[in-house]
Image (tube, rainbow, N blue to C red):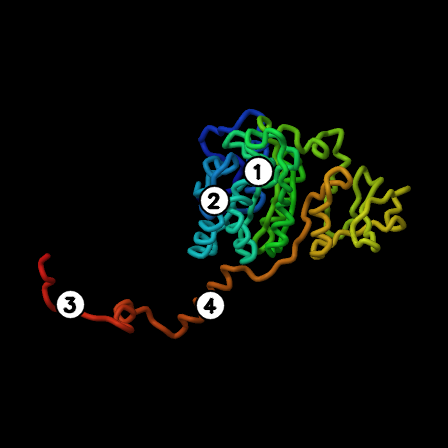
Amino acid sequence: MNELTKLTPKDFATDQEVRWCPGCGDYAVLKAVQRVMPELGVRPENTVFVSGIGCSSRFPYYMETYGFHTIHGRAPTFATGIKLANPELDVWIITGDGDALSIGGNHTMHVLRRNLNCQILLFNNEIYGLTKGQYSPTSRVGTRSPSTPFGSVDRPASPCAFALGSGARFVARGIDVSKGLADVLKAAHGHKGAAFVEIYQNCIVYNDDVFAPFTAKENAGNQLWLVHGEPMLFAGGTKGLALDRDAPALKVVDVEGGDWQSAGVLVHDARNRMIAHMLVEMPFGAFPTALGVIYDDPAATFESAVVEQNSQASAGKSADLQALVAKGQSWEVTKEPHAI
């Protein structure tokens, strides 16, 4: 494909039949990614989508790019190998709450702490959809499922809190059907390093409307879309988040007449890791749900450090396989082996 060719979303869509349950939030995420790709200026031949196992992991089949549908929880491992083999490739990891935080928890942790330059999209529907509705690491207390018919007693994991605790340098949230997801995806791609994006995704079959308290149209006022340098306002600007210095913790304050300064509303600083932790751990109901770019503080990437190290190690040396084989302990067999 000519580098000057102007691409469209259709250039990133395959001829494969998209096979998710009718009404699944995965369709909306797929369309959002396909729409955003041309705007990012990326090329299909330089792009790789890597997934593990789960409903979301069918994603690579539907992107007209290179793709790997790998094994349960190991997408970060494959992505690391791909990026080290060719650091110029644009690598996306597609995963789910079960794939990334259960069997793949340690792999997710290490790709974040290493800061591999990639985009990680975690589809969180708080349930195991592919395996027929068992509760997942993010399922809330009381979730009824085939594996917890009386209601789960597990305390759920917070994907974004996990990411921050693992050393992630970019953490964001979006909603499958929200127009704001496109801006989150663009910001993630623009970040140099591991960009972690949790996407609230509705499973219409096994966990329908679990996010309705803030995703339903009538509850949109419970969404706090964060913008660096802008006040943390929600509910049409009538409420905001302030710092309760006695706790210390965040608190909801009323904003009268648009005077958010007098109400003590915080201005979002995406580089403030302490506030980021508070934002991702706000409980449902009592607080709004923090969305958008929550934390963004770039650092050196893993593959750039590996490339630099290899460059220094090979400086002034020439490749000689025979010399490498003969180095150290070696021997030569000069007689025929005895017959057995």
Tell me the CA gap for discs 1 and 3: 57 Å
- Whether the residues at callouts 1 and 3 have beta carbons within 8 Å, the answer is no
- Whether the residues at callouts 3 and 4 have beta carbons within 8 Å, the answer is no
Discs 4/1, front: 1
Residue underneath mark 4: 309
Q: Nearer the viewer, residue 49 or 88?
A: 49
Residue underneath mark 2: 50
x and y, in percent, of residue 211 in the image? 67, 33
Report whether residue 93 is seen. Answer: yes
What's the residue type where badge 4 is placed?
A: Gln
What's the residue type where badge 2 is placed?
A: Val
Q: Quadrant of residue 269?
A: bottom right
Report the quarter where the C terminus lies.
bottom left
Q: Which mark is residue 333?
A: 3
Which residue sits at x=62%, y=58%? 298
Residue underneath mark 1: 136
x and y, in percent, of residue 256 in the image? 90, 42
Tell me the CA gap for discs 1 and 2: 21 Å
Discs 1/3, front: 1
Instruction: Find numbered disc 1 in the image and state the secondary structure of the residue it sits on.
Output: loop
Q: Nearer the viewer, residue 226 or 248?
A: 248
Discs 3/4, front: 3
Report the quarter where the N terminus lies.
top left
Q: Choose the circle earlier in sequence order: 1 or 3.
A: 1
Q: Choose the circle earlier in sequence order: 2 or 3.
A: 2
Instruction: Find numbered disc 3 in the image and state the secondary structure of the residue it sits on.
Output: loop
Q: Residues within 10 Å of mark 4 (few under 14, many from 20)?
A: few
x and y, in percent, of residue 319 in the image? 32, 68
What's the residue type where badge 1 is placed?
A: Ser
Tell me the CA gap for discs 4 and 2: 26 Å
